[in-house]
Amino acid sequence: MTLKEAQYLIKHIELGTLEEKEDTRTAIEKKDNIQRLVLKLIEEFGELAENIRKNARYTGESIKGTIEEEAFDIFYYIIAIANEYDIELEKVFLMKDKLNQEKYKREFSLEEAREMYKKVK
Ligand SMILES: [Mg+2]
């Protein structure tokens, strides 16, 4: 799954339909929703902290109450927030990675990592 696909899926989960609907919310409704998403994100960080403290890992049964579940939940809300601002995360990822590569003087690029990934996978 690509980030683009994840953004599409989560956009439609939030809309409650696979239909392409025009966003008819007022600016206040949209802002309220963003605040709700940020509060949910913070809540999920708390759940992740608890599960890390308990070292609650997925063992092949249920994902409920595990670090894996909360990592997903955090990912979900970050995507949902990006969607509210029409942020294309794949583009931002590339731009930010370039900045980070320079900032931290990393010797390999994202493209090199992708090539290596293809070889080892
Ligand atoms: Mg959770």
Image: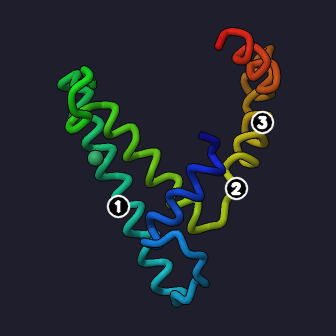
Q: Is residue 70 left or right of residue 77?
A: left
As measured in the structure, the alpha-carbon distance from the residue carrying label 2 to the one carrying label 1 is: 22 Å
For label 3, the residue is 99
Between 49 and 121, the one lying in front of the other is 121
* Label 3: few (<14), some (14–19) or many (≥20) C-alpha neighbours in 10 Å: few
Q: Is residue 98 left or right of residue 89?
A: right
Residue 88 image point, x, y percent: 70, 55
- Relative height, residue 57 to residue 31 (above, below): above
Which amino acid type corresponds to the residue marked 2 in the rendered image? Answer: Glu
Which amino acid type corresponds to the residue marked 1 in the rendered image? Answer: Leu
Q: Residue at x 56, y 50 (%)?
A: 6
Between 21 and 34, the one lying in front of the other is 21
As measured in the structure, the alpha-carbon distance from the residue carrying label 1 to the one carrying label 3 is: 29 Å
For label 1, the residue is 39
Q: For residue 118, what is the image quadrant?
A: top right
Split into 4 quadrants, where in the image is the N terminus? top right
Numbered disc in front, either 2 or 3: 2
Q: Residue at x 51, y 87 (%)?
A: 25
Mark 2 falls on what kind of element?
Answer: loop
* Label 1: few (<14), some (14–19) or many (≥20) C-alpha neighbours in 10 Å: few
Q: Which mark is residue 88?
A: 2
Instruction: State the count of labels.
Output: 3
- Relative height, residue 88 to residue 25 (above, below): above
Split into 4 quadrants, where in the image is the C terminus? top right
Which amino acid type corresponds to the residue marked 3 in the rendered image? Answer: Leu
- Ligand 1 is within 8 Å of the C-beta of the residue at disc 3: no
Most extreme residue toward the top, as rendered?
120
Residue 10 image point, x, y percent: 50, 58
Contact between marks 2 and 1 (CB within 8 A): the answer is no
* Label 2: few (<14), some (14–19) or many (≥20) C-alpha neighbours in 10 Å: some
